[in-house]
Amino acid sequence: MSIKEKRLERGWTQAQLAEFSGLSQRTIQRLEKGSPATIETLKCLAAVFELDIKELGVAELADETQLSEDEITELKNIRAIRRFVVELIAYLIIVPLICLAGYIHGGSLRNGLGLAVGWGFWLAYSAIDLFDTKAFMGKDWEKQQLDKRMGRKEK
């Protein structure tokens, strides 16, 4: 049974469910349209409906409650990588379009290039923060370099 069906079964409006759960009415609307929910949101709804999270009819997130702490951490990393890739694609599409528009309308690329540099620095920072740079030049890398320079065979 969906969240909407559970709400209607009790005769509640979206505003009432929002009030009872401590969530915003907009959040309730998004959930009823099929948007994903956080675990915290599901816990609030489960408490209001006096159900287990698995019984809320949100199968995609119910599985997340079965994950270990390591799996949850990795899932967060995967989602962060996805956000980074989406932003990188947006960068690769929007910056050339703005440069082209500036060139066509004013004959100058300065506005687009300023955006490209600023956004590019932000993307570079995000990439350094996101991807494990310690693995790239950390202790394992140092050991590999030392073994290589000393002529030792890698294990």
Image (spheres, rainbow, N blue to C red):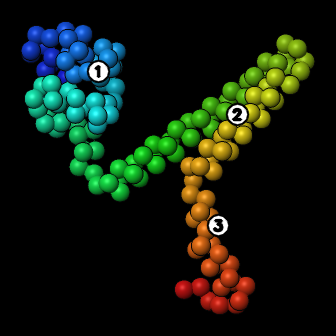
Q: Where residue 1 sits: x, y (%)?
A: 13, 26
Question: What is the CA distance from the residue labelled 1 to the residue labelled 2?
Answer: 34 Å
Q: Relative to 66, is 59 above or below? A: above
Q: Relative to 126, is 140 above or below? A: below
Q: Is residue 85 left or right of residue 125?
A: left
Mark 3, other Cα within 10 Å: few <14 / some 14–19 / many ≥20: few
Say which element carries label 1.
loop
User: Which residue occupies 66% across, 45% down?
Assistant: 125
Say which element carries label 3.
helix
Say which element carries label 2.
helix
Q: Which residue carries the number 2 mark?
A: 119
Of the image marks 2 and 3, the number of the one nearer the N terminus: 2
Mark 2, other Cα within 10 Å: few <14 / some 14–19 / many ≥20: some
Q: Amino acid at mark 2?
A: Trp
Question: What is the CA distance from the residue labelled 2 to the residue labelled 3?
Answer: 25 Å
Q: Which residue carries the number 1 mark?
A: 23
Q: Relative to 128, is 27 above or below? A: above
